[in-house]
Amino acid sequence: MIARTQAIATVGFILVAALMFTQAQPARARFGEIYKGELVSVDNDKLLLNIKPCSPESDRLIVSFQAPYRMKATEKVTCQNRDKTYVSTEVEQR
């Protein structure tokens, strides 16, 4: 009975660890890098940009910018499968 409980606990730990690793942290932009994508969030000193906005939710790629950065909205974009329209934003890490 103890061995079975330990085995279940081990499997549970592995599943939790795997879930934590699949939810990756945003990539951090470096000085001079410029990305275009869909604006996710902005606060006082941080901006998050989804640079794969037409991909499924599981494949999205978020890039994090820290102040100072330059941001400009560029154009309205419709994804090829036409199920989503968003304002493309260009951001440069300074």
Image (tube, grey):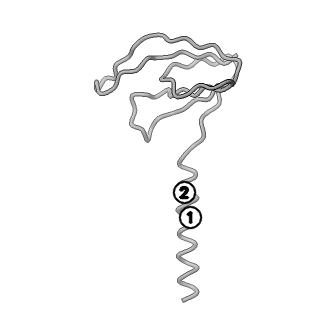
Report whether 5 appears left or right of 30: left
Residue in the image at 65% along x and 26% along y? 46
Question: In the displayed structure, would residue 18 be above or below residue 70?
Answer: below
Q: Position of residue 32 (x, y in %)?
A: 67, 16
Query: Residue placed farthest to the bottom in the image?
Result: 1
Residue with the mark numbered 2: 18
Evaluate if marks 1 and 2 touch, with contact meaning CB atoms under 8 Å apart. Answer: yes
Report whether 47 appears left or right of 4: right
* Amino acid type shown at disc 1: Ile
Q: Position of residue 17 (x, y in %)?
A: 58, 58
SS under mark 2: helix
Report whether 25 appears left or right of 59: right
* Residue sitting nearer the eye, 66 or 31: 66
Q: Position of residue 8 (x, y in %)?
A: 52, 76
Residue with the mark numbered 1: 14
Count of numbered badges drawn on the protein = 2
Query: Residue placed farthest to the left in the image?
Result: 82
